[in-house]
Image: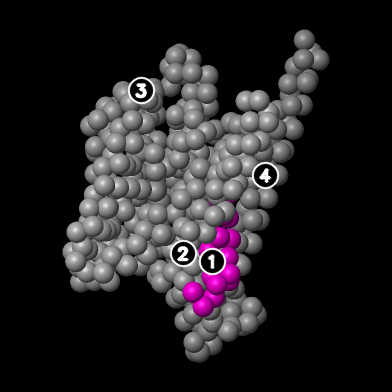
Amino acid sequence: MALADGTSQDFSVARDVRGLAVTFGLLGLVIAGFVVSLITGPSSLSVGAGLSALFVDTGGPETVVMREIRLPRAVLGAFVGAALGLSGAAMQGLLRNPLAEPGLIGVSATAALGAVIALQTGIAAAFALALPAFALIGAGVAVSLLLLLAGPRGSSLVLILAGIAISALAAAGTSLVLNLSPNPFAVAEIMFWLMGSLADRSWTHVWLAAPLILVGGVVLLLTGRGLDALTLGEDAAEALGVRIGRLRLMVVTGTALAVGAATAVTGAIGFVGLVVPHILRPLVGAVPSRLLPASALGGAAMVLFADAAAQGLLPDRDLKLGVLTAFIGAPVFLHLIFRTRRAGL
């Protein structure tokens, strides 16, 4: 018995050490991605001049470029990536399905529909914050419909079906707006927005999205212990004192706040919430309470590096971030599928 206890303690210590190593490694990646995002852009600023302009006001254009263009873009990228990665890990833990992702509950699609309506009606041009405001309203409508259809105590299957129905309805609404639009310029603007991008984002977008992402992120992080218990099954989790209905409501609400705010200011950015938890799950031992913060850091790093690549690969063209994340995420996801198939799982 003593040997068994000692072995268990050694395993627990090794797991904690590995978890700390993964956390510090991801934190280093986020810092590196943040710096790379800051020094990447269409202007001809040198690395040294650009970074120094963040701290010393030179009175020249480099200060404006770094403080008002690149810095808010990098900060917003970190927030959006963290929101997508964290929400993806939470949804996968709640549904106990590695194929789950934040858009499964319809928040992304309805937020996009709200933004499309703002663009098509011209409200976005008349009022600067109309586009993200309409997108947030769309996300709120999605949560309301989801709770109405699935109910606070609905099963995971009902939750998935309700989310799919809401997403399909929102996608149909977006297509209808595009189909009936008499203005080709509005259609082009809508299509570009739907691709997802951090370009031309300012501190206004950061202050709009960051508080909602922070609140949603805290709510999702608080579900870690409940999601740990849920890995044993709903009956076992309830026996351990977990209120499944409350846990489900917290995950849905936190995801709606974080992803809705992220989509409201950047458009649709896919695959981050799906791929990042997959990559990190083997490194943290498939424990949801450990995977949640790791996925937040991993999502932030992925978006920051992807945005830097979007600016550097085609500097004379506006390569959309959502397009690049899809090109990165899809092959990674296919690799994970083939690896799982070879393992016979």
Between residues 120 and 137, which one lies in front from this camera angle? 120
Q: Does label 2 or label 4 sit earlier along the sequence?
A: 4
Is the residue marked by circle 4 packed among few (<14), some (14-19), or many (20+) residues within 10 Å?
some
133 w.r.t. 313: above or below:
above
Circles 1 and 2 in contact, beta carbons < 8 Å: yes
Measured as percent of width and height from the top left, residue 133 is found at 26, 58
> Which residue is at a point 44% across and 76% down the rendered structure image?
68
- Number of marks in the rendered image: 4
Query: Can you identify the residue that label 4 sits on?
Result: 22
Query: Can you identify the residue that label 2 sits on?
Result: 320
Q: Nearer the viewer, mark 4 or mark 1?
A: 1
SS under mark 4: helix
Q: CA distance from mark 4 to mark 3?
A: 34 Å
> Which amino acid type is shown beneath numbered disc 2?
Lys
Question: Residue 155, labelled with which disc?
Answer: 3
- Magenta residues, as a range? 297-317
Q: Nearer the viewer, mark 2 or mark 3?
A: 2
Q: Quadrant of residue 248?
A: top left
> Which amino acid type is shown beneath numbered disc 1?
Ala
